Amino acid sequence: MISVKEAFQKFRSGLELTEREQNDASRRQKDIRGYMDECFHVQRDFLTGSYKRWTKTKPLKDVDIFFVLGEDERPYRAKHPSVLLSRVEGKLVEKYGRDCVKCQRRSVSVEFGVAGEDERVLSFDVVPAYDKDHHYEIPDTNSKTGWTDTDPEIHAEKATAANKAFGGEWKGMVRMIKRWNVEKGKPVRPSFLLEVMALDLLRPPFGGDYPYEFESFLSSAAARIHEEWPEPARLGPPVSDIMATADKDQAKSALQQASDSAREAINLGRQGQNGEALKAYRRLFGDLFPLS
Ligand SMILES: Nc1ncnc2c1ncn2[C@@H]1O[C@H](COP(=O)(O)OP(=O)(O)OP(=O)(O)O)[C@@H](O)[C@H]1O
Ligand SMILES: [Mg+2]
C-alpha cells in the first residue's frame, strides 16, 4: 500500500498543471490577446496571478492576464472604474458571447469549454491595467478611489523565496491548501488570502512531514483568520477585506474542523491504520487525494 508521505507527494504532483493544460491556456491567451489588441491600445500583456506563480489549484480556472493599456486609453482612468470594465466586457461579449463573459470587481472573466471534456471549463480574468511608477493600477469597483495599486512581481518574488526556504515544498502546500478550500465550498475568500497567510504560517524549514505541516497551518490559520492580512506588497487593500465578520467566523470553524480532522488522520497513521488514514485525508482534500 502507498504510504502517507507518498500519497501526499502524488497528490501534490497531481495538482501541477499538465503540458496540455498549459498549452490550452497559452492558446486561449493568444486568442484573447489578439482580440484585445484590436479593440484597445494595449502596451503589453502578461500572464500573472497564481497561474504564473504555480500556486493555482485544480481544476484550472481564472487564469489572470494583465493588459497594460497605453496612453490612448488614459481617459478611462479619470472615470469610474466600471466604465472601463464595462467597455472591456462589451468588447469581449461581441467576440465570445454573453453567456461566457462576466464583469467582476477587478476584471472581466471569459469562459471556454475544455476540448474533449463535457463539463470542464477554462476561464480567464482579463485585467486592464495602467503603469504607475514601478507597479500597476487596476480598476477595483469595491475600493473607495475605484482603483487598486498592485505589484505582481513582488507577489511572485515572495512566493519564490518562501518556496526556496521551505525546501521547494511551499507552492505545492499552497496548491493543496487551496484544494481543501475548494473541496469545502470556499470557506476562505479570496483564495489568495490562503497564500498570503501561508507566507507567514508555513514556517521553514519543511520538516518532511506533510500531515504535521497541514495540521499546524490549519490550526494557526483558524486562530488568526480574524486578523487583518495586509497585501504583501503593501500597495493594495488588505487581502482579508472581502469577508465580513460572520464569514470569518465560518472560515475559522472550517479551518479548526480541518485541523482536527488532520490530527485524527495523523493518529490513525500512528496506530498503523494506514488505509484509514488515507481515507481520512481524502475526506479532507477530496477525490484528487490518492488512495493507491
Ligand atoms: N488586495 C490586493 N491588492 C493588490 N493586489 C492584489 C490584491 N489581491 C490580489 N492581488 C493580486 O492580483 C492577483 C490576482 O488575484 P486573484 O484573486 O485571482 O488571486 P490569485 O492569487 O490569482 O488566486 P486564484 O488561485 O484564486 O486565482 C493576485 O495573485 C495578486 O497578485
Ligand atoms: Mg487568479
Image: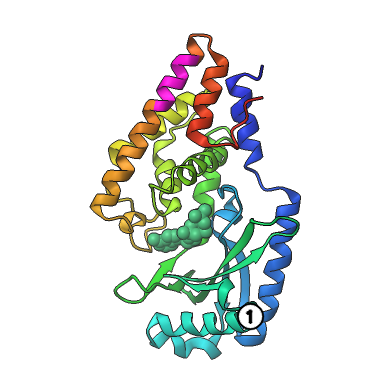
Nearest the eye: 147 or 85: 85
Q: Is residue 49 above or below residue 140?
A: above
Q: How many marks?
A: 1
Residue under the image location 55 percent in, 90 percent down: 72
Q: Is residue 267 magenta?
A: yes
Q: State the residue position of label 1.
A: 36
Residue 109 among those drawn in magenta: no
Q: Which residues are magenta?
A: 261-268
In this image, 116 relative to 90: left or right? right
Residue 51 quadrant = bottom right
Q: Nearer the viewer, residue 119 or 19?
A: 119
With respect to residue 256, does 76 lie above or below? below
Specify whether 181 is left or right of 145: right
Relative image position of residue 265 (x, y in whole percent): 46, 21
Instruction: Say which residue appears at 46% left-offset and 90% top-offset.
Output: 75
Which amino acid does the dot numbered 1 rest on?
Met
Point 65% across, 31% down: residue: 10
Asked whether, in this view, residue 115 is left or right of residue 133, the answer is: right
Say what secondary structure mark 1 lies in. helix
The image shows residue 239 at horizontal and vertical percentages of 37, 56
Of the 4 image quadrants, the one containing the C terminus is top right
Label 1 beta carbon less than 8 Å to ligand 1: no
Q: Horizontal and vertical percent for residue 85?
A: 47, 79
Asked if one can make out residue 154 in the rendered structure from this viewpoint, the answer is no
Main SS class of the magenta portion in the image: helix
Q: Residue at x 64, y 56 (%)?
A: 119
How crowded pointer 1 is (Cα within 10 Å; few <14, some 14-19, many 20+) is rated as: some
